[in-house]
C-alpha cells in the first residue's frame, strides 16, 4: 500500500476498480443491458418520428376520400398493392397515412393528459406527505373517492354532456388519472420528510415551499418518471377506448381507436381494418410500459413489485 | 377493531356520496336536462314547463339533496328516454353485469394465481419469463380491440362461439375472457412477488427442515400468506371491471348495466347515467371494504393496527 503516496498517472480503469463506476456510468450500463428498455425506447422513438414528420412520411393525404378505391387490402394480402401499403378504408382513404397521422393523436393526448394528472397528483401527494394531519386525511379521502370513480363511465358521461373533442378528452382524462401520482408521491414524501437533510433545511430557516420544491421534489424524480410513463400509456388506452365508443376524438380525425371502431362493420370480410390500428395501439402501449418497467429497474430498483 | 370497522364504514359512505355528488353536479351543471328530455327542437315554453315539472329550476344543491334522499329510498326517478323508473331498468340489467364480472374475476384468478405461484417457485425460469410475457402483453392490449380479435378468431374465422347477445352460457365465454384478461396481469404479479417473499422467510425453512412435502409447503404454508394481499386487489379489480363492462358489453351486445350506461350516455338520459355511476362506485366501495375486513380477519397483524 506504500505506492498510494506516490503521485503517478493512474489508468481510469484502475480508479473505477477502486472507487467504483460513476453513478451516470452505472445508469448507462444498466440501461444498455436492459432488453425491455431498449426495445421500448426504440418503438417509442419510431412513434414520435411518425408523429413529428407525418406530412413527409405519409404517402397520401389521410383525409382524401376515393370512393372508387374502397377496401383495398394491405400489401401482405393477395389483392394488395404497394400504392396503398396498408390498404384503404371504407371511404377509400389511405390507411397507412391515417395510421401515421394517428400517432400524433395518441401521443399528444397521452402526454398532455398525463401532464395535467401529474401536476394534480404530485401537488396533492407532496403536500399530504409533508404536512400529514388533517391535510393528509383530506387527500387520502380524495384518493379513495377517485379510486371509487368508474373512470370510463364518468369520462364518457362528461364527454357526452359537455361535448367531445381532443382538447376536452385531454382535460377529462387529466382530471381523472392523478391517483397513482398522488399515492406514490405521498408515501415517498413521508419517507423523505424524516431524513436529516430536510430537518437541516428546516433548522436553517428555509421556507416550506423552498423545502418542498428544492429539497424534497428532486428526490421524487425517479419514481415520478416511472409513473409518468405508466399514466401516459393509461391515457392512450382510454383515449382509444373513448374514441372507439364514439365519445372521444371526432371523425374524420384518424385516432387509432376511432379507426378500429370504423372497421367494426367490416369484421366479417375485412378484419384487417380492425387488426392494423389495434396492432399499432398495442405496440405503442407495450413500448411505453416496457420503457416504464425498464426505467424502474434502472432508476429505482427498490420499487420493483 | 370495532372502531376501525365503524370508521371505515363512515369513510366508505362518504366516498360514495362524494363521487355521486360530483358526477351529479358535473352532469346537471354542464348539460341542460330539459333540452335532453325534449330534444333540440323544443320551444322555450315547453322547456320552461319541463324545468318546472322536474324541478330543474331549483338550485343545484336542492336538486342534489332531493335526488339523494329519494335514491336512498331506492327511487332514482324516471328515465328521460324510456319513461320507466330507473330502478326497474337497473334491476333488469345489473344481474347480467354482476354475472359477467364474477365470471371474469374467477377466470382471472384461476389463471393468474397458479401462474404466479409457479413463476415464483422458479424465478427467471422459462415459466417465469412466460408468465411475465403474458402479463406485459395483457397490460398493453386495449380491451375493446382484444374483444374484437376474439370475435374474429372464435366467431368469424372459426365459428365456435356466438359473438353477440346474452342468451346462453356460450355467449358469456368470449366476454369473460376479454374482461378477465385485463385483470390478470396485476393479480399474477402480486401473487408472484408475494410468493417470492414468503418462500424466503424463516417459517418456510422450518417447514422444509421438518421434512414436509414441497406441495404442502407451497400450498398450505406459503400460498395462504401470499394470497392475503391478492384479496384486496381482486376486490378492487372487480370494481374496475364493472367500469370495463361498459366497453365489453357494447362490443358483445350484452344487455347488462354497462350497456345500459352506454346507451343512456348516448341518449343524454341523465337519471340513468347518474344511477349507474352511483351503483358502480358503491359496489367498488362495498367490495373494497369487505376485502379489507377479510384481510384483517386473515392476518392478525393488520387487525391490531
Image (spheres, helix red, strand yellow):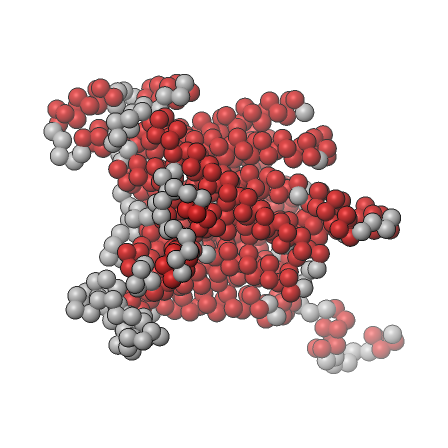
Rendered residue at 63%/25% (across/down) = B4
Residue A106 seen by the camera? no
Horizontal side of B135 relative to A196 (left or right) equals left
Front in this rendered view, residue B182 or B6? B182
Q: Quadrant of residue A6?
A: bottom right
The spot of residue B6 in percent (x, y) is 60, 22
Classify residue B281 as left or right of residue A217: left
Q: Nearer the viewer, residue A267 or B129?
A: A267
| In the depicted structure, whether residue B270 falls above or below residue A14 | above
Quarter of the image containing the C terminus of chain B? top right
Q: Is residue A85 left or right of residue B205?
A: left
Q: Quadrant of the N terminus of chain B?
A: top right
Instruction: Kindly indicate the quadrant of the structure image that contains residue A75.
Output: bottom left
Q: Residue B245 at x, y = what percent?
A: 42, 43
Q: Position of residue B277 (x, y in %)?
A: 40, 33
Q: Is residue A284 above or below residue B213?
A: below
Q: Relative to A176, is A232 above or below?
A: below
Q: Which residue sits at x=54%, y=33%? A: B287
Residue A88 picture quarter: bottom left
Say if residue A144 shows up in the picture: yes
Residue visible at 27% across and 43% down in the picture: A163
Q: Is residue B88 above or below residue B186?
A: above
Q: In this view of the protein, which residue sits in the foreground, B53 or A145?
A: B53
Q: Horizontal and vertical percent for residue B62? A: 33, 19
Amino acid at each position: 500500500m506504500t505506492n498510494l503516496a506516490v503521485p503517478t498517472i493512474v489508468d481510469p480503469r484502475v480508479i473505477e476498480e477502486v472507487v467504483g463506476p460513476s453513478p451516470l456510468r452505472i445508469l448507462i450500463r444498466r440501461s444498455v443491458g436492459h432488453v425491455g428498455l431498449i426495445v421500448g425506447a426504440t418503438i417509442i422513438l419510431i412513434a414520435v418520428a411518425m408523429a413529428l414528420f407525418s406530412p413527409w412520411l405519409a404517402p397520401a393525404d389521410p383525409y382524401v376520400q376515393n370512393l372508387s378505391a374502397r377496401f383495398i387490402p394491405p400489401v401482405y394480402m393477395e389483392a394488395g398493392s404497394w400504392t396503398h401499403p396498408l390498404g384503404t378504408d371504407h371511404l377509400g382513404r389511405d390507411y397507412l397515412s391515417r395510421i401515421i397521422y394517428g400517432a400524433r393523436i395518441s401521443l399528444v393526448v397521452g402526454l398532455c393528459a398525463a401532464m395535467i394528472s401529474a401536476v394534480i397528483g404530485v401537488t396533492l401527494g407532496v403536500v399530504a406527505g409533508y404536512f400529514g394531519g388533517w391535510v393528509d386525511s383530506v387527500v387520502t379521502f380524495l384518493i379513495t373517492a377517485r379510486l371509487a370513480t368508474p373512470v370510463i363511465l364518468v369520462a364518457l358521461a362528461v364527454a357526452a354532456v359537455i361535448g367531445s373533442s381532443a382538447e376536452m378528452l385531454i382535460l377529462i382524462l387529466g382530471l381523472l388519472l392523478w391517483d397513482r401520482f398522488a399515492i406514490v408521491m405521498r408515501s415517498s414524501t413521508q419517507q423523505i420528510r424524516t431524513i436529516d437533510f430536510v430537518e437541516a433545511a428546516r433548522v436553517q430557516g428555509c421556507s416550506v415551499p423552498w423545502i418542498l420544491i428544492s429539497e424534497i421534489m428532486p428526490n421524487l424524480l425517479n419514481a415520478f418518471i416511472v409513473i409518468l410513463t405508466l399514466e401516459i400509456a393509461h391515457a392512450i388506452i382510454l383515449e382509444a377506448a373513448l374514441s372507439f365508443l364514439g365519445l372521444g376524438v371526432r371523425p374524420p380525425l384518424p385516432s387509432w381507436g376511432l379507426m378500429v371502431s370504423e372497421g367494426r362493420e367490416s369484421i366479417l370480410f375485412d378484419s384487417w381494418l380492425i387488426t392494423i390500428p389495434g396492432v399499432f395501439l398495442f405496440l405503442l402501449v407495450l413500448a411505453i410500459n416496457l420503457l416504464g418497467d425498464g426505467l424502474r429497474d434502472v432508476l429505482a430498483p427498490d420499487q420493483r413489485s | 377493531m370495532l372502531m376501525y370497522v365503524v370508521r371505515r364504514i363512515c369513510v366508505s359512505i362518504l366516498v360514495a356520496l362524494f363521487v355521486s355528488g360530483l358526477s351529479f353536479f358535473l352532469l346537471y351543471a354542464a348539460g341542460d336536462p330539459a333540452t335532453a328530455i325534449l330534444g333540440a327542437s323544443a320551444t322555450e315554453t315547453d322547456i320552461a314547463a319541463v324545468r318546472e315539472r322536474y324541478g330543474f329550476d331549483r338550485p343545484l344543491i336542492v336538486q342534489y339533496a332531493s335526488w339523494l334522499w329519494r335514491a336512498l329510498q331506492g327511487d332514482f326517478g324516471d328515465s328521460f328516454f324510456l319513461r320507466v323508473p330507473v330502478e326497474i331498468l337497473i334491476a333488469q340489467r345489473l344481474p347480467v353485469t354482476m354475472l359477467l364480472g364474477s365470471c371474469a374475476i374467477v377466470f382471472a384468478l384461476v389463471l393468474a394465481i397458479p401462474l404466479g405461484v409457479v413463476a415464483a417457485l422458479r424465478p427467471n425460469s422459462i415459466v417465469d419469463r412466460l408468465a411475465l410475457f403474458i402479463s406485459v402483453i395483457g397490460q398493453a392490449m386495449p380491451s375493446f380491440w382484444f374483444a374484437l380479435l376474439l370475435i374474429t378468431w372464435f366467431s368469424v374465422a372459426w365459428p365456435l362461439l356466438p359473438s353477440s347477445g346474452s342468451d346462453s352460457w356460450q355467449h358469456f365465454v368470449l366476454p369473460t375472457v376479454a374482461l378477465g384478461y385485463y385483470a390478470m396481469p396485476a393479480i399474477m404479479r402480486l401473487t408472484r412477488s408475494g410468493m417470492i417473499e414468503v418462500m424466503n422467510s424463516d417459517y418456510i425453512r422450518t417447514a422444509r427442515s421438518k421434512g414436509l412435502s414441497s406441495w404442502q409447503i407451497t400450498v398450505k404454508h406459503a400460498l395462504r400468506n401470499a394470497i392475503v394481499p391478492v384479496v384486496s386487489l381482486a376486490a378492487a379489480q372487480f370494481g374496475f371491471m364493472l367500469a370495463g363492462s361498459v366497453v365489453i358489453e357494447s362490443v358483445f351486445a350484452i344487455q347488462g348495466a354497462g350497456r345500459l350506461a352506454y346507451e343512456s350516455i348516448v341518449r343524454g338520459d341523465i337519471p340513468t347515467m347518474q344511477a349507474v355511476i352511483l351503483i358502480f362506485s358503491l359496489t367498488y366501495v362495498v367490495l373494497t371494504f369487505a376485502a379489507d375486513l377479510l384481510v384483517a380477519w386473515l392476518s392478525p397483524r393488520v387487525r391490531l393496527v
